[in-house]
Image (cartoon, rainbow, N blue to C red):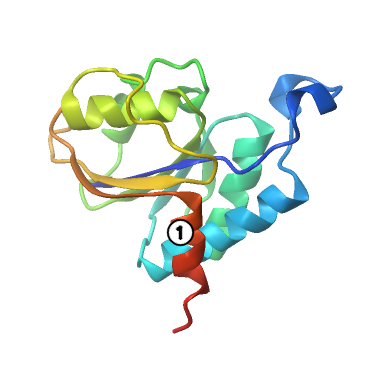
Amino acid sequence: MDCVLLRHGIAVERDEWAGPESDRPLTERGAKRVAQVAAGLNRLDVQPTHVLSSPLIRAIETAKIAHSSLRVRAAVQIVDELLPDAPPNELLSILSNFPPESCVLCIGHEPQLGMAASIFLSGRSSGSFPLKKAGACLIELSIPLKPGRGVLRWWLTPIQLRTIGKRGG
């Protein structure tokens, strides 16, 4: 199983947002950059079979852009296991519900995504694997899913993904 972890794009700053934190949206620039990152994922031949998103608006907006750009057939699924404060090991439990040949795109937040990557790769939760906004990584997970058995295929910054996306056919 392939798991792509993608952090949400640039959102409106907390001090500039009067609404609930959960409703803080992407900026126009953030949405544009997510679309460019999705183009990079497309050029890398990422073909998600499923898209999971945190319930926070900025993650849902990121998921919708990626879902459309990557032409995913299955609907975006909203899961609490991708919330910023969700225990990162719970994401592994959710992923175990998908077929072994799946490619699952997970859109969420830091520090949760980085800690989930740490569990997938090393078996321990660590803050040593942070993802930048709209940054992504691909981790191949062996079946049965167990902490520490993932293999890192790539880890790319948003700038790298946008550059890949800009390269023509």
Residue 83 percent coordinates (x, y): 52, 23
**Residue positioned 35% across, 67% down in the render:** 45
Q: Is residue 70 above or below residue 62?
A: below
Residue 23: x, y in percent?
A: 74, 28
- Compared across the picture, whether 31 is left or right of 134 comes to right
Q: Residue at x 35, y 46 (%)?
A: 137
Query: Mark 1 — residue?
Result: 161
Residue, far right: 18
Does dot 1 land on a helix, a strand or a loop? helix
Q: Which residue is outermost to the bottom? A: 169
Is residue 101 visible from the viewing direction of this image?
yes
Q: Quadrant of residue 19?
A: top right
Q: Which one is nearer the viewer's eye here, 142 or 32?
A: 32
Please tell me whether residue 76 is drawn above or below residue 128 in the rendered image: below
99 vs 52, nearest the viewer: 52
- Measuring from the top left, give residue 113's x and y in whole percent: 41, 30
Q: Is residue 139 above or below residue 169?
A: above
Q: Residues within 10 Å of mark 1 (few under 14, many from 20)?
A: many
* Amino acid type at mark 1: Leu
Q: Is residue 87 above or below residue 135?
A: above
What percent of the width, then of the height, locates residue 169? 44, 84
**x 47%, y 77%: residue:** 167
Residue 60 versus residue 27: which sits nearer the camera? 27
Query: What residue lies at 62% left-to-right and 40% top-to-bottom?
Result: 60
Q: From this viewpoint, is residue 73 visible?
A: no
Total marks shown come to: 1
